[in-house]
Structure formats: C-alpha cells, structure tokens
Image (cartoon, helix red, strand yellow):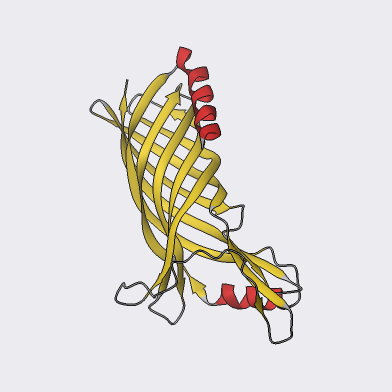
Amino acid sequence: MKKILLLITVITLSFNAFSQFQIGLKGGLNLTTLKAAYSTGGLADKVQESWNNNIQSKSGLGLGFVMSVGGSVFRFQPEFVYMQRGTGIKGSSSEFKTNYFDTKLLFNIGGGGERWKIYSQFGPSFNFWLSKGVYDKNGKLVPGTDKWEDGTETTLPNGETASTRDIRFDIGFVLGLEGRIKVGPGWILINPRYEFGVIPQTINDLGADVYSRVNRDISLNTGYLFEF
C-alpha cells in the first residue's frame, strides 16, 4: 500500500506545474461475475466449464473518492473506491458476495469544449479483498461461507489431494469512457467502464489439475468534481 501511495504522489507532483486539480466523489452500479479461468486441463477443464455455465451477473454498488490532475487533453485520475462484487447462481436466489477496497490509477485521454469533455480511460486497479460470503434469498449469511480459504488440503475419492486458497490482493485493468459536463464550480461526470481481474481471486487445486476464479466487472458511475 505504501508503494502505491508513493507512486500516486510522484505522478501527481509531475503534473502539478502545468495542470488543473480536481477532487470529488463518485458512485454507481456494478454488474459483476466471478469467472473461472486459467485451467490446466483434465478435470479442471470440466469444473471450469460447469462453473461458467451456472453463474450469472449480480448487482452491487461502488462508492468512492476521486482526484484528477492534468491538462485538457491528458489527465491522471487516482480513485479510492469501496466495491461490492461477487456472482449470482443460475436457478438459485443465493448470491456469492465480496467486498473490496480498490485503488485505481487511471489515465484519461481526450478533450472537448469549455462546457463538456469526453475521455477514453484506462489503467490498473489494485484491489484489496475485505470480506466474502454466500447469502440466501432473505439476505442472510450462510454460516461458514465467510471464512477465508487458506489452502488446507482434503482427500479426493481418487486418493489425490485438493485444496482451495483465497488471494486477498487482486490486480485488475480498467477500460472505459468518461464524459464531463460543466455545472457550477466543477464537473458532473458519467463513466461507463469494464474491469477484468488479472490475478486470481481463488485458486482451486483439484489434485493433478488447477483452475482459478477471477473478477469481471461492468460499471456505470456518476459523480461531481470540484475544480481548483
């Protein structure tokens, strides 16, 4: 975390001599899934296919703090966001819910007039997994589903060992657009985007084969930036 904050400081200071500084809040709706990926073959391929065929998107919220520094064409935009993620299960009212704190280091390229601007947006997101759990149709936590998997081994019917391990730190990559409208002392922003996790959230070792689960997010955010 200290290294990420140092990187934000260095990049922000490099812009300060010739830039406008903006600060504000944003929030929005997320549609997320927990996709199975990185299969090594064999049984893992079958489990991965079955998992992906039986999940669906779930909705959640994202709320956070945003800064933006730069000129009219190129801007650096760090964000600090609480994110609700997870996945739904087809044919079931239960949901697997996760909560994250994200630090997004984004870059905007674009431009516009004095009253509006539009940017393409991209950059990495460093995500810290805070909590998890399976919740039933009444929104109650299923007992035991909030415990972290630490790689404890179990024996499969074929005599091989299996284990599941949660990775509490994720790196994602963000692609999106950001529209801005000048209202009062600052800017209203509208921000659709897609984020895909690169580091697995969970690694499932099935003995001879391994597959993982990774985050996939679609979000629509809005917010307001005060300009200084």
Q: Is residue 202 left or right of residue 190?
A: right
Q: Residue at x 46, y 75 (%)?
A: 89
Question: Front-most of 103 and 24?
Answer: 103
Residue 59 visible (yes or no): yes
Q: In the image, what residue occupies the spot 57% across and 56% down?
A: 167
Give the side of residue 139 with respect to residue 70, left or right: left
Q: Quadrant of the C terminus?
A: top left
Q: Is residue 30 above or below residue 163?
A: above
Q: Judge whether 78 appears above or below 162 on screen.
A: above
Which of 197/156 is in front? 156
Residue 38 in picture, x, y percent from top left: 68, 63
Name the image quarter holding residue 212: bottom right
Q: Residue furthest bottom?
A: 157
Residue 143, by quadrant, is bottom left
**Residue 102 location in percent, x, y?**
46, 45
Q: Nearer the viewer, residue 209 or 90?
A: 209
